[in-house]
Amino acid sequence: MQLTNTWRRRLTTTGLGSAKVIVTILVICSVISGASTVWRWVFPPDVTPAAVTARSVGNQTAMVESYAIDCVTVLLTASTSRAAEVARCFPNSTDMALPTTSPLIVSAQAASATFVGQTAPDVETYGVIVAVTEQSYTNAPPVRSYYQLPVSVYAGGAPRAMAKPARRDPPPPGVDVSLDYPVTITNDAALAAVISGFITCYLTDAAGIERFVTVDSGLGPLRAYSAATVSSIRAQQPVPEAPAEAAELRVWVTVSARAADYTTTPLEYPLTLRATGGAWSVAGIDTVPAIDSDAPAVPVATGSR
């Protein structure tokens, strides 16, 4: 380090003893500062953003789920010609007696890696539940089955089944939640005409959906059915006769949709309506309906799952 002329004059004035003390302090501070810089260079702080870490964990979970689906499907459908695929997934696969032809048809696979197990150096473990629909032949009744598969991940990107899967019971049946749409809208109400017009134009080939939606709704015709009938409409609150501009209303709409082959499908739509110029228009389809938070949830009987 270099001393300025000002500091040289101060040191001369205060005397040699004081100068030595001051110089010593300055040198020590310089050494500490330099050591701190070297330390930060050798051991840089972890500046990994939380979003990057969360994305990495999410990507690994998705990889584990995809791998578990692949391995369970391979095992359930394996035949002697696919022994190498089984060995790729499972340890100790040579003790398996594979059939000469595939025993099952497997479809509609889904997985959930919600259980995190123990870890070891460079190894993480997961418990994955894999759901599949099984059929013993093409027209056989489909059976929904659940399997638990333990999966290890080495170095963040190399999955491997830790054992063969275990057949599991279905997930718990859950509860029935009360929806919060206590007000019935009659078929002769002006609001019913708007909703019926929207449903018809949204689900069928009928033109004119722009008459029933707001400009920012993002909704366009699906043209998926030949006809659609509104069975009932319930609202979250009473409908005002003269709604304020931009006022919103949530409604629950029950629909019967008919396909070209005359088969019918029951549909239910949670909609948000918005008032513009004193008239209601559909502003969007709610992802989740409104629920009555004061009503107790009713557990579903175990035999219903």
Image (spheres, rainbow, N blue to C red):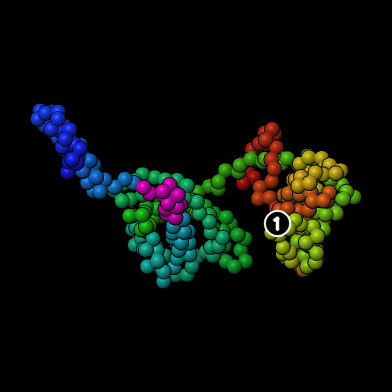
Q: Position of residue 161 (x, y in %)?
A: 38, 55
Name the spot of residue 54 as percent of width and height, x first. Answer: 44, 49
Nearest the viewer among 88 and 235 is: 235
Packing grade of label 1 (10 A; few <14, some 14-19, many >=20) is: few
Please provide percent x and percent y for residue 64. 43, 55
Q: Residue 240 appears in which quarter of the rendering?
A: top right
Residue furthest to the bottom: 81
Does residue 23 lie above or below 42 as drawn? above
Q: Residue at (85%, 54%) from the top-left corner?
A: 193
* In the foreground, 139 or 56: 56
Q: Is residue 53 left or right of residue 239?
A: left
Q: Is residue 296 magenta?
A: no
Locate residue 21: give its quadrant.
Answer: top left
Q: What residue range appears in magenta? A: 47-60
Q: Residue at x 62, y 66 (%)?
A: 139
For the stretch drawn in magenta, the main secondary structure is helix
SS for tag 1? loop
Can residue 46 be spotted in the picture? yes
Can you tell which quarter of the image residue 303 is in? top right
Quarter of the figure that contains the N terminus: top left
Q: Position of residue 221 (x, y in %)?
A: 73, 64
Whether residue 184 is visible here, answered yes or no, is: no
- Seen at 76% across and 57% down, the residue is 213
Residue labelled with disc 1? 216
- Seen as rendered, the residue at the extreme right is 188
Q: Nearer the viewer, residue 11 or 234?
A: 11
Q: Nearer the viewer, residue 159 or 46?
A: 46
Residue located 71% across and 53% down the image: 284
